[in-house]
Amino acid sequence: MTALLYAVVAAAGNIVGGLAVARGAKAGLKFIEGMLAFGAGFMLSVAIMEVLPEALARGGNLAAGYALAGYLLVHLTQHTATQHFHFGEETHSVSEIAGASALVGLLLHTFFDGVAIASGFAVSRELGILLFLAVFLHKLPEGVTISSLQIAGGKRPAQAVGSAALLGAATIVGVLVTDWVSFLSVHGLALSGGVTLYVGASNLVPEFQGKHGWYLQFAFFSGAAGFLLARELLRMAGAG
């Protein structure tokens, strides 16, 4: 039940991001761009320092294979089978098919967001909360991405927000399915580790690494520092 509640909160981030696009909230979109960079630093730190070591300790070489499979699966759905995809606001017209294929690709990714949260809480409360934070931080940019793609493809703002809500629903389903499917209960942490690594390194980082200025770079390194701080605070709270 705890993992499900956290997944519901994370899912709400998709809707908020979608609403920011639908209402043309430029100041909000600028903030979300910074959160994208912050989330990238946080996600990479969680994946490398917590999720992958824990998965490897539990499953060894088999877990390493599943982590690679998760990484490759996201690349297949978002950048091979999908016609047009990048994180952040879409400012150019795209075809309706491109918007639909991006939605399908993101649905798989957001499903594994739920798997990650459920798998984390199955290990410990600390890891569950850290994974929830990693997921939540990229939920707003995710909502922006799919909503702006839908609008660029000719959909109405309400339909665009509905697409963002579907992504949130997929995360909730991911939590529920992890509890029901024994394969995900055993290997979900390794799979979600690969997915988290891909989203942070291959989706989010390229969105800002070529941009000039200090704002986004500072946000990225702050995300890594934020992870270290959050982990320490959670450990202190657990010891107290």
Image (cartoon, rainbow, N blue to C red):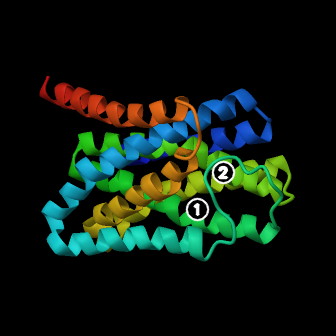
Residue drawn where x is 57% and y is 49% of the image: 207
At label 1, which amino acid type do we have? Leu
> Is the C-beta separation of discs 1 and 2 under 8 Å?
yes
Q: Position of residue 133 (x, y in %)?
A: 40, 39
Q: Is 177 or 133 nearer to us in this picture?
A: 133
Report the residue that reaches farthest toward the top: 240
> Residue 106: which numbered mark, if any?
1
Residue 64, relative to residue 203: is it above or below? Answer: below
Q: Earlier in the sequence, mark 1 or mark 2?
A: 1
SS category of the residue bearing label 1: helix
Residue 23 is at least partly visible in this image: yes
Q: Quadrant of residue 42?
A: top left
Q: Position of residue 9 (x, y in %)?
A: 50, 39
> How dense is the environment of label 2, judged by Cα within 10 Å: few (below 14), some, or many (20 and up)?
many
Apparent side of residue 113 relative to residue 211 in the rendered image (left or right) = left
Residue drawn where x is 53% and y is 52% of the image: 206
Apparent side of residue 140 relative to residue 100 in the rendered image (left or right) = left
Q: Name the residue that disc number 2 marks.
A: 145
Residue drawn where x is 57% and y is 32% of the image: 213
Apparent side of residue 130 relative to residue 236 in the rendered image (left or right) = right
Apparent side of residue 212 relative to residue 226 in the rendered image (left or right) = right
